Image (cartoon, rainbow, N blue to C red):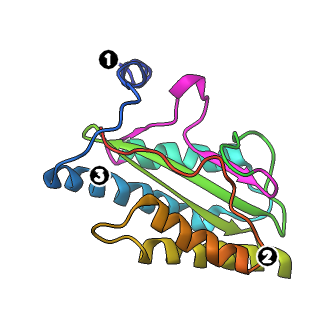
Amino acid sequence: MTLDDTLEIEAETRTGAIKIHKPADFEGMRKAGKLAAECLDMLIPYVVPGVSSDELDRLAREFILDAGALPACLYYRGYPKTVCISRNHVVCHGIPGDWALREGDIVNIDVTVIVDGWHGDTSRMYGVGEVGPRARRLIDITYEGMARGLAAVKPGATLGDIGHAIQSYVEAQRCSVVRDFCGHGLGK
């Protein structure tokens, strides 16, 4: 079975149903999430002016496959790449291509991997070279909003509690939360 066959089968078996996982299931998700985060760490020295987004995608694919995992985005609903790379005003799900990163760009790279059937999904925002003060402010506010959302995660907390922690901070900074693309399930 080839990588293409495996990914096509994986995509066909997804039902979209939300599953409540058992405590033992979280170890698989943690392992997959750790690999996705390590992939983003590996890319740090390559997120520089002049590198193509295709090159970043290639590096991520090699890293994921070398770790014995699968790139979950590749071929999912026809998506042609391993990662999503969104630059500047593109909110998410940007498709890598031959376009190069430029000094001052803000780039978000979204990595989703499959490890032993478990999905790990994460993204990171990078400043390319020297970024201007408005870009730095956006990066900092976004990071702090995420940190406040994570701090709200605790037993009994609802998604609304987490969203409120993020949104109230971000709006107090005169920014806004994108109402679409606010999350999804995770698991096998």
In this rendering, would 16 be left or right of 103? Answer: left
Above-or-below relation of 147 to 38? below
Residue 62 position within the rendered picture, expressed as x and y whole percent measured from the top left? 47, 44
Above-or-below relation of 27 to 58? below
- For numbered disc 2, what is the local secondary structure? loop
The type of residue carrying mark 3 is: Met
Q: CA distance from mark 3 to mark 1?
A: 25 Å
Q: In the rendered image, which quarter is residue 117 located in?
A: top left
Image mark for residue 1: 1
Residue 159 position within the rendered picture, expressed as x and y whole percent measured from the top left? 44, 59
In this rendering, would 94 be left or right of 75? Answer: right
**Residue receiving disc 2:** 174
**Residue receiving disc 3:** 29
The type of residue carrying mark 2 is: Arg
Q: Residue at x 69, y 55 (%)?
A: 178
Q: Is residue 102 within the magenta segment?
A: no
Residue 96 visible in this rendered orientation of the protein? yes
Q: Residue at x 23, y 50 (%)?
A: 28
Residue 80 position within the rendered picture, expressed as x and y whole percent measured from the top left? 61, 29
Image mark for residue 185: none
Magenta stretch? Answer: 67-90
